[in-house]
Amino acid sequence: MLKSIFKIVVLGLGIILLFSGFGLGKQEEEEQVRLEGKIIDTEKNPLAGAEIQLKNLGTNQVVTVKSNKKGDFTFRTFFPGKYLLTAAREGYVSHSLEVELEPGDDRRLIINLAKGLSQEQKNQQEALDSFQKGVSLANEKKLDEATAAFKAATELKPDFAEAYINLGLLFFQQSKDEEAEKALVKALELKPDEPRIRATLGSIYFEKARILLEADKFDEALEQLKTSYSYNPDYSYTSYLQGYAHSKKGNKEEAIKYFEAFLEKEPNSPQASKVKEILENLKKQ
């Protein structure tokens, strides 16, 4: 009988000691802090179900709560110190801030979460970042890296006309005419009225024609010059090469027409005196 009474008494003391171990003195209660707040969206609507994490930067201990249907959350009775508070909810951009809490603080925060970007918006942002990187690399003469950056921009945003333009110009500078033409034709589809694209495409076909003329391939050269003119009719030297090609083929009237067109646009050019001499001879024939 005594043994059973003794056991019960000991068990009872254990329960009392267990709870007294979690008790707080008056001073500790006064030093403890309370943190509460509300999670809202950019239109000030409450966000339920947001996860709010509070990390003690001194001890790395983490406590997590969720906002209720009114967007409210509360962290009750914890100790002062520096904390990192992070609020997150699916479909929204998470937000973090450091909070330093003093003894006895009763703090309330309003945390605004912006809607997250859609995949398309993320791709557009990444494309823009890649484009800016390409511009910087091109200015540093790092052409291969710049080319890769512009390519990445077009892959992320297939309608990114400026990226195709810069890619085409880079290829053109490196005498990679086929790659340049492909990029610029795509850019022209997206921006049909952009003069830079037409001028560069005209230059590509002009260079092709010049190389063919050096090889005495006059018919092929004239086809390239015709395409060059269709892109950039204001480039006077296209007329000059057309006049030259036709004179070599014996097309007197065509040669005169193009040489005169050249002189009309470039009367004071270094080639003007030579063209005038050729015209005089053609007209005498």
Image (spheres, rainbow, N blue to C red):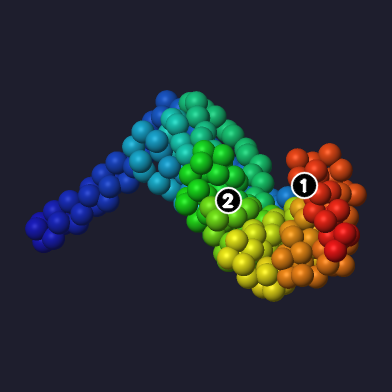
Q: Name which quarter of the figure residue 117 lies in.
A: bottom right
Residue count near mark 1 (Cα–Cα under 10 Å), binned few <14, some 14–19, many ≥20: few
- Type of amino acid at the residue the image marks with label 1: Lys
Residue in the picture at 62% in, 67% down: 216
153 vs 139, nearest the viewer = 139
Q: Which residue is mark 1?
A: 274
Label 1, secondary structure: give it. helix
**x, y (%) of residue 240?**
77, 55
> In this view of the protein, which residue sits in the foreground, 200 or 74?
200
| Measured Cα–Cα span from mark 2 to mark 1 | 30 Å
The image quadrant of residue 229 is: bottom right
Q: Nearer the viewer, residue 124 or 142?
A: 142
Residue name at image x 42 percent, y 25 percent: 27
Q: Nearer the viewer, mark 2 or mark 1?
A: 1
* Residue 17 vertical placement versus 249 (above, below): above
Quadrant location of the C terminus in the rendered image: bottom right
Residue 281 visible in rendering: yes
Q: Residue 123: give x, y in percent of width and height.
A: 60, 61
Q: Is residue 129 left or right of residue 234?
A: left
- Precedes in sequence: disc 2 or disc 1: 2
Picture coordinates of residue 161 (x, y %)?
A: 70, 59
| Residue 119, percent from left and from top | 61, 65
Report which residue position mark 2 lands on.
Answer: 173
Q: Residue at x 84, y 39 (%)?
A: 268
Give the quadrant of the N terminus. bottom left
* Residue type, numbered disc 2: Gln
Viewed as shown, does residue 224 lie left or right of 257?
left
Q: Residue at x 80, y 54 (%)?
A: 278
Q: Is label 2 in contact with label 1 (beta carbons under 8 Å)?
A: no
- Residue 233 appears in the rendering: no
